[in-house]
Image (cartoon, grey):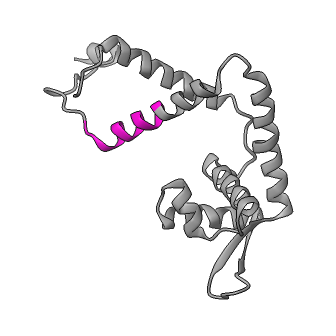
């Protein structure tokens, strides 16, 4: 059974999302040439290197749930700044794998490991269960908003600036 949430609850959720965006903006600034998407790719490369074998581009695309061309672009950007490198698989030379360079490991250690450890020490009044529920809720909201077009009635109102009114 579906139910309609009260508008005040929706407003509260959207305000929380705005605050979440502000939280992300408080993270340490990235060096020139590095984007949040690049950092996410680095984090997944590190994760896969630690838990399995060095990843392929397709492994990263699957984890991030994005297209291979999108990841290929991010990988090329990271390779251009010498943060990752490509190499041939030992068993099957046709397979290209990825690994972080020393510079990539330093960037990962600073922007992911060190920062996340610091943040974990700061957040002592939020339970792990609350964090998981919050993350799941945001993921569901994003999925809903990105796959459904709003069915709004009529045309969006046009805003006229005061200078435009005076010219009439």
Residue appearing at x 65%, y 62% in the figure: 77
| Highlighted range, magenta | 137-149
Q: State left or right for residue 100 relative to residue 137.
A: right
- For the C terminus, the image quarter is top left
Asked if residue 16 lies in the magenta stretch, the reply is no
Q: Locate residue 95, reporting x and y percent.
A: 62, 82
Q: State left or right for residue 84 relative to residue 77.
A: right
Dominant secondary structure, magenta: helix
The answer to whether one can see residue 72 in this image is no
Of residues 83 and 124, the one drawn nearer to the viewer in this rendering: 124
The answer to whether one can see residue 69 in this image is yes
Of residues 53 and 97, the one drawn nearer to the viewer in this rendering: 53
Q: Locate residue 85, reporting x and y percent.
A: 74, 71
Q: Locate residue 3, reporting x and y percent.
A: 24, 22
Q: State left or right for residue 113 relative to residue 33.
A: right
Residue appearing at x 50%, y 67% in the figure: 68
Residue appearing at x 57%, y 24% in the figure: 130
Q: Locate residue 104, reporting x and y percent.
A: 79, 58
């Amino acid at each position: 059974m579906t139910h309609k949430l009260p508008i005040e609850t929706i407003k509260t959720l959207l305000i929380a999302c705005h605050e979440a965006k502000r939280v992300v903006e408080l993270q340490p600034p990235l060096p020139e040439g590095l984007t949040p998407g690049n950092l996410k790719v680095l984090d997944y490369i590190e994760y896969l290197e630690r838990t399995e074998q060095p990843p392929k581009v397709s492994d990263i695309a699957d984890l991030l749930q994005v297209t291979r061309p999108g990841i290929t672009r991010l990988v090329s950007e990271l390779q251009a700044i010498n943060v990752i490198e490509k190499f041939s698989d030992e068993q099957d030379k046709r397979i290209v794998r990825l690994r972080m360079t020393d510079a990539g490991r330093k960037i990962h250690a600073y922007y992911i490991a060190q920062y996340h450890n610091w943040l974990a020490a700061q957040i002592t009044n939020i339970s792990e269960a609350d964090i998981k529920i919050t993350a799941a809720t945001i993921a569901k909201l994003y999925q809903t908003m990105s796959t459904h077009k709003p069915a709004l009635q009529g045309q969006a109102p046009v805003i006229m600036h005061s200078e435009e009114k005076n010219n009439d």
